[in-house]
Image: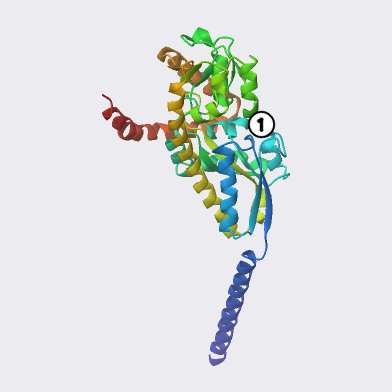
Amino acid sequence: MISIARNSIVIALGIFLIACGSNDSAQEAGRAALDTSKTFRWKMVTTWPANFPVLQEGVEKFAREIEAMSRGRLKIQVFAGGELVPALQVFDAVSQGAVEMGHGASYYWAGKIPAAQFFTSVPFGMTAKGMQAWLYEGGGLKLWREVYAPFNVIPFPLGNTGVQMGGWYNKQINSLDDLKGLRMRMPGLGGKVLKKAGGNPVLISGGEIYTALERGTIDATEWLGPFHDLRLGLNRAADYYYFPGWHEPGSELELIINKTRWQELPEDLQQIVKTAAVASGAWIYAAFEYRNSQALLAVKQKQHVQLLELPQEVLAELRRLTGLTLDEEAAKNADFAKVYAAYKDFRADYVGWNEIADKSYEKSLED
């Protein structure tokens, strides 16, 4: 019995020492993973023009904050659209590992990933608040990452434009007939709805919009809101400025990162990137709201510009056509159908709160 007891003690002591050794090894591995002497130099490409306020500005702010928080361990060189790769090839550049990061809007990749459009904006869909709730708490971000996974890309929310304007037109829109044959720059699902209404959607980058509208290559364009629209000079190319932005009521912007390179980052640097994305995203949305409110005053002072609301009958028909478009797209693509179902389920629950909270409050402010 004594011999058995002695052996048991020896075995127990051995297990204890092995466990201690394992803990030490784990701790050493953890310290190695957090080696603060290693630095990273990454490239980031965007879909935005050089020096573009709020969007390119926000991305450069994001890069500076990461460098500061990491004490120089992660430095990101930012390139505007066309400087390193064409604006509409950002996703491919990140997916293929030519660069580590990108910034743009997911609906630009609709031809490659139809379901990606939900993660920017849906016509007559949720505004910025609803999108944030869906992505961060309602399972939207999980779906987004599942859709991008086959491309070796990880998406993160990074900014929102808020409700956009309905766009600039070279003629008045009094009925749905006025949309027939209209050549309009309008990407994403909104463009598909416009096509179903008889229009001709055109996808061009921001840097090409003014020239196309001024030369008559297109008849109308949506862009962002008063601040950016005036800076682009769209008021000099068209006289009719419509609202609301039914096609993009809360356009989410995306940070995309090559998955292979992301996994090479130590955990603390990953956390810094995540935190900076949230902070810079909040700043982008706030900047849109403030600058648009100020720019709208300038729009109202321009004598030749007519600020007009789209007729309710036009909006009602566009909303009906949106439902048809979404159903048709879902029938063609399984991922689209899956995300669409999740989006609808979340919105059905969320709309009740929105009615009680925001809409009832706004109604109380009416004269």
Q: Secondary structure at mark 1?
A: loop
Corner quadrant of residue 38: bottom right
Q: Quick check: 286 above or below 122? A: below
Residue located 67% across and 33% down the image: 87
Q: Which residue is mark 1?
A: 112
Residue 99, horizontal then vertical, whole percent: 70, 45
Q: Looking at the image, which residue sits at the far top?
A: 177
Residue located 64% across and 35% down the image: 47
> How dense is the environment of label 1, judged by Cα within 10 Å: few (below 14), some, or many (20 and up)?
few
Residue 115, horizontal then vertical, whole percent: 58, 32
Query: In this orientation, which residue lies closer to the viewer: 235 or 253?
Result: 235
Residue located 55% across and 55% down the image: 272
Q: How is the image coloured?
A: rainbow
Residue located 61% across and 73% down the image: 22
Query: In this orientation, which residue lies closer to the viewer: 66 or 26?
Result: 66
Corner quadrant of residue 308: top left
Residue 25, horizontal then vertical, whole percent: 63, 73
The answer, for residue 68, to whether it is visible in the render is: yes
Identify the amino acid type marked 1: Lys
Horizontally, residue 320 falls left or right of residue 221, namely: left
Q: Looking at the image, which residue sits at the far bottom?
A: 2
